[in-house]
Image: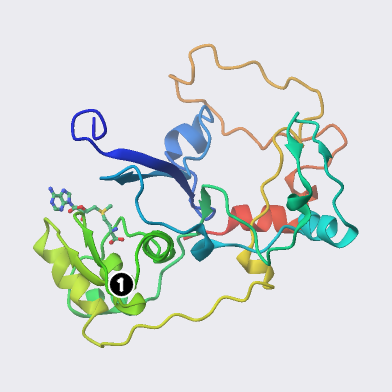
Amino acid sequence: MLCEEYGFHLAQEFYWWNPSKLPSPAEWVTVRRVRVKDAINTVWWLSKTPWPKASNRRVLQPYSPSMMNLLASGYKAKRRPSGHDISNKFGQNNGAAIPPNLIAIPHTESNSYYIRYCQENNLPVHPARFPAELPEYFIRMLTDSGDIVIDPFGGSCITGEVCQRLKRHWQCIELSEEYLKGAMGRFVRGVYEKSVSDPAAESNYYRIPRPGILWNGDHGDRLPQDGGKKRPAKVYAPHKRTSGSDYSAAPISMVAKAQDRD
Ligand SMILES: C[S@@+](CC[C@H](N)C(=O)[O-])C[C@H]1O[C@@H](n2cnc3c(N)ncnc32)[C@H](O)[C@@H]1O
């Protein structure tokens, strides 16, 4: 509708993955076990022109270990198994990699100045806040310092806080006066800082297992014929492999990341 009726151009779709998302909707996911965890939000980058200003150089990420190996050992141009012809330029070390449109940001804020301000002033803490890195990613990629950023669904004004830090002008529009009063907590101190990330820190990375790596060829229980409509009498135990090992046998980093919680 936004494109066909209002003339916006869809520059790109992004997917924000919250690795620390609790299993939800819980009834469907953890009780009836008929859906998987809902942990992705779509972000539409819509533009008034087909050529919005942007630079992916602002959002580069470290090369993967396999790419680092390839750069170290030298890449030989050849046709890939996928059928793509990749030239020698692919083996050039540009210092960092272009990211995919999947953005992994855990939502773990639980002790911020904003939350304390709301609690101390008896104001509601906004229940659907974004992690600061989400607006920051797009503000850095798509705007320059001095530009104006408008957030029509401002909530707790995290966009405004990020803009203060990145030296953009900003306006947040919000329906609820209570949320705006709480948002004031982000600005009363006049301090806008963020610790610099360490690209070498393991905690800045997420590993995603390939699907099916715990499957042992056993087809398991019969599927619920009613699609889970009737609540199961018992809670199913996690699927065990016949070898006797279960999820605890997976590499620790794989499991620990999935178990991070808000
Ligand atoms: C998902 S929240 C935004 C959260 C925000 N990004 C943050 O991190 O705090 C969406 C907000 O939009 C507000 N909202 C919904 N409809 C609105 C409207 N028509 N005009 C202004 N705000 C609206 C809601 O009150 C809610 O606070």
Q: Position of residue 70 (x, y in %)?
A: 83, 55
Q: Position of residue 221 (x, y in %)?
A: 68, 20
Give the quarter of the image for residue 132.
bottom left
Residue closer to the observer: 119 or 258? 258
Which residue is located at x 74 percent, y 19 percent? 219
Side of 186 where 142 appears, left or right: right
Q: Is residue 138 visible?
A: yes
Give the quarter of the image for residue 247.
top right
Q: Is residue 256 above or below residue 29?
A: below
Side of 22 where 65 appears, left or right: right
Q: Is residue 156 visible?
A: no
Furthest residue in direction top, as rendered:
225
Q: Quadrant of ligand 1?
A: bottom left
Residue closer to the observer: 178 or 142? 142
Q: Is residue 121 above or below residue 30?
A: below
Q: Is residue 179 above or below residue 249?
A: below
Which quadrant holds the N terminus?
Answer: top left
Which residue is located at x 52 percent, y 62 percent? 59
Side of 1 where 84 appears, left or right: right
Residue closer to the observer: 252 or 54? 54
Say which residue label 1 marks.
163
Q: Position of residue 83 (x, y in %)?
A: 75, 28
Identify the element where label 1 is drawn.
helix
**Type of residue at label 1?**
Cys
